[in-house]
Protein backbone atom coordinates (compact mmCIF):
# COMPACT_ATOMS: atom_id res chain seq x y z
CA UNK A 1 0.00 0.00 0.00
CA UNK A 2 1.33 3.41 -0.95
CA UNK A 3 0.09 6.91 -0.24
CA UNK A 4 -2.14 8.36 -2.92
CA UNK A 5 -3.12 12.04 -3.02
CA UNK A 6 -6.67 10.85 -3.56
CA UNK A 7 -6.69 9.99 0.16
CA UNK A 8 -6.28 13.66 1.16
CA UNK A 9 -9.41 14.89 2.96
CA UNK A 10 -8.43 18.47 3.73
CA UNK A 11 -8.29 18.13 7.50
CA UNK A 12 -4.57 17.98 8.18
CA UNK A 13 -4.57 16.03 11.45
CA UNK A 14 -6.60 13.24 9.83
CA UNK A 15 -4.50 13.37 6.67
CA UNK A 16 -1.32 12.99 8.74
CA UNK A 17 -2.80 10.05 10.64
CA UNK A 18 -3.88 8.44 7.38
CA UNK A 19 -0.37 8.81 5.92
CA UNK A 20 0.94 6.94 8.96
CA UNK A 21 -1.74 4.26 8.51
CA UNK A 22 -0.72 3.73 4.89
CA UNK A 23 2.92 3.49 5.91
CA UNK A 24 2.14 0.91 8.63
CA UNK A 25 0.07 -1.25 6.29
CA UNK A 26 2.70 -0.98 3.54
CA UNK A 27 5.44 -1.99 5.98
CA UNK A 28 3.43 -5.01 7.09
CA UNK A 29 2.77 -6.03 3.49
CA UNK A 30 6.44 -5.88 2.55
CA UNK A 31 8.25 -7.08 5.67
CA UNK A 32 10.08 -10.36 6.07
CA UNK A 33 8.24 -13.11 7.96
CA UNK A 34 10.52 -12.69 10.98
CA UNK A 35 9.51 -9.02 11.24
CA UNK A 36 5.74 -9.67 11.12
CA UNK A 37 5.13 -9.63 14.90
CA UNK A 38 6.91 -6.27 15.28
CA UNK A 39 5.20 -4.71 12.24
CA UNK A 40 1.78 -6.01 13.31
CA UNK A 41 2.27 -4.65 16.83
CA UNK A 42 3.18 -1.27 15.34
CA UNK A 43 0.05 -1.35 13.17
CA UNK A 44 -2.15 -2.30 16.14
CA UNK A 45 -0.63 0.53 18.19
CA UNK A 46 -1.33 2.93 15.33
CA UNK A 47 -4.91 1.68 14.89
CA UNK A 48 -5.64 2.15 18.57
CA UNK A 49 -4.42 5.75 18.57
CA UNK A 50 -5.95 6.49 15.14
CA UNK A 51 -9.39 5.19 16.02
CA UNK A 52 -9.38 6.66 19.53
CA UNK A 53 -8.56 10.06 18.06
CA UNK A 54 -11.35 9.92 15.48
CA UNK A 55 -13.85 8.45 17.94
CA UNK A 56 -13.08 11.24 20.43
CA UNK A 57 -13.49 13.89 17.72
CA UNK A 58 -16.84 12.43 16.73
CA UNK A 59 -18.03 12.28 20.32
CA UNK A 60 -16.84 15.72 21.43
CA UNK A 61 -18.20 17.46 18.32
CA UNK A 62 -21.43 15.44 18.38
CA UNK A 63 -20.90 14.19 14.82
CA UNK A 64 -24.38 12.93 13.89
CA UNK A 65 -23.59 9.67 12.01
CA UNK A 66 -20.86 8.53 14.41
CA UNK A 67 -22.33 5.17 15.42
CA UNK A 68 -21.55 3.23 12.23
CA UNK A 69 -18.11 4.87 12.00
CA UNK A 70 -17.24 3.86 15.58
CA UNK A 71 -18.60 0.36 14.94
CA UNK A 72 -16.38 -0.02 11.88
CA UNK A 73 -13.32 1.03 13.89
CA UNK A 74 -14.22 -1.55 16.56
CA UNK A 75 -14.57 -4.30 13.94
CA UNK A 76 -11.13 -3.55 12.50
CA UNK A 77 -9.59 -3.58 15.99
CA UNK A 78 -11.22 -6.94 16.76
CA UNK A 79 -9.82 -8.34 13.53
CA UNK A 80 -6.35 -7.00 14.33
CA UNK A 81 -6.46 -8.58 17.79
CA UNK A 82 -7.61 -11.91 16.32
CA UNK A 83 -4.80 -11.80 13.74
CA UNK A 84 -2.25 -11.07 16.49
CA UNK A 85 -3.33 -14.27 18.27
CA UNK A 86 -2.83 -16.23 15.04
CA UNK A 87 0.64 -14.73 14.63
CA UNK A 88 1.47 -15.85 18.18
CA UNK A 89 0.56 -19.37 17.04
CA UNK A 90 2.98 -19.10 14.09
CA UNK A 91 0.45 -18.19 11.36
CA UNK A 92 1.95 -15.86 8.77
CA UNK A 93 -0.60 -16.41 6.01
CA UNK A 94 -3.58 -14.68 7.62
CA UNK A 95 -1.63 -11.60 8.64
CA UNK A 96 -0.68 -11.08 4.99
CA UNK A 97 -4.34 -11.42 4.00
CA UNK A 98 -5.30 -8.98 6.77
CA UNK A 99 -2.83 -6.40 5.43
CA UNK A 100 -4.29 -6.79 1.94
CA UNK A 101 -7.82 -6.48 3.32
CA UNK A 102 -6.88 -3.23 5.10
CA UNK A 103 -5.39 -1.89 1.87
CA UNK A 104 -8.67 -2.67 0.09
CA UNK A 105 -10.85 -1.36 2.94
CA UNK A 106 -9.16 1.97 3.56
CA UNK A 107 -9.99 3.89 0.33
CA UNK A 108 -13.73 3.32 0.77
CA UNK A 109 -13.62 4.08 4.49
CA UNK A 110 -11.71 7.30 3.88
CA UNK A 111 -13.90 8.36 0.96
CA UNK A 112 -17.23 7.75 2.65
CA UNK A 113 -16.86 7.88 6.42
CA UNK A 114 -13.70 9.88 7.08
CA UNK A 115 -14.42 12.52 4.44
CA UNK A 116 -17.79 13.23 6.08
CA UNK A 117 -16.04 13.66 9.42
CA UNK A 118 -13.37 15.91 7.86
CA UNK A 119 -16.10 18.10 6.32
CA UNK A 120 -17.90 18.27 9.66
CA UNK A 121 -14.74 19.27 11.55
CA UNK A 122 -13.62 21.90 9.03
CA UNK A 123 -17.12 23.37 8.85
CA UNK A 124 -17.27 23.65 12.66
CA UNK A 125 -13.81 25.27 12.80
CA UNK A 126 -13.89 27.47 9.72
CA UNK A 127 -17.48 27.71 8.56
CA UNK A 128 -17.00 25.84 5.27
CA UNK A 129 -15.96 22.52 3.86
CA UNK A 130 -12.32 21.63 3.17
CA UNK A 131 -10.73 22.54 -0.11
CA UNK A 132 -8.29 20.01 -1.50
CA UNK A 133 -5.98 20.71 -4.41
CA UNK A 134 -4.64 17.68 -6.22
CA UNK A 135 -1.94 17.50 -8.79
CA UNK A 136 -2.74 15.29 -11.75
CA UNK A 137 -0.22 12.53 -12.21
CA UNK A 138 0.45 11.33 -15.71
CA UNK A 139 2.13 8.12 -16.70
CA UNK A 140 5.06 8.46 -19.01
CA UNK A 141 4.95 6.22 -22.01
CA UNK A 142 7.83 5.29 -24.23
CA UNK A 143 7.60 6.58 -27.77
Image: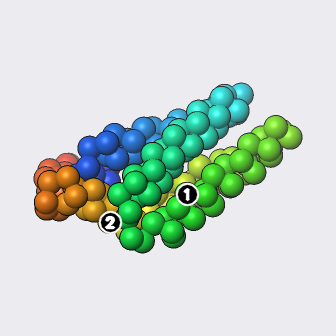
Q: Which residue is mark 1?
A: 73
Is 64 in front, or is 133?
64
Q: Which residue is at 25% across, 62% downward?
A: 119
Q: In the rendered view, how is the structure colored?
A: rainbow
Q: Which residue is mark 2?
A: 116
Looking at the image, how many numbered discs can be counted on the residues? 2
Q: Which residue is at 26% across, 44% downward?
A: 12
In the displayed structure image, the side of residue 98 where residue 132 appears, left or right: left
Kindly report the distance in space between the C-alpha atoms of the residues bearing marks 1 and 2: 15 Å
Is 44 in front, or is 5?
44
Residue 125 appears at what percent x and percent y? Answer: 20, 52
Q: Quadrant of residue 76?
A: bottom right
Q: Which residue is at 51% across, 70% downward?
A: 68
Residue 62 appears at what percent x and percent y? Answer: 38, 63
Please tell me how crowded label 1 is: few (under 14), some (14-19), or many (20+) other residues with Cα within 10 Å: some
Give above or below for 133 relative to 72.
above
Give above or below for 25 relative to 136.
above
Q: Secondary structure at mark 1?
A: helix
Q: Which residue is at 54% across, 44% downward?
A: 47
Give above or below for 72 relative to 19.
below
Amino acid sequence: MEWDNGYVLGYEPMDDTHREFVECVGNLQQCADDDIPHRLDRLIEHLGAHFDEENTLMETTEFPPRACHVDEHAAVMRSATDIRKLVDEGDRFHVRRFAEALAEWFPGHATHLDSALAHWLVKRQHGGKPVVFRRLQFERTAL
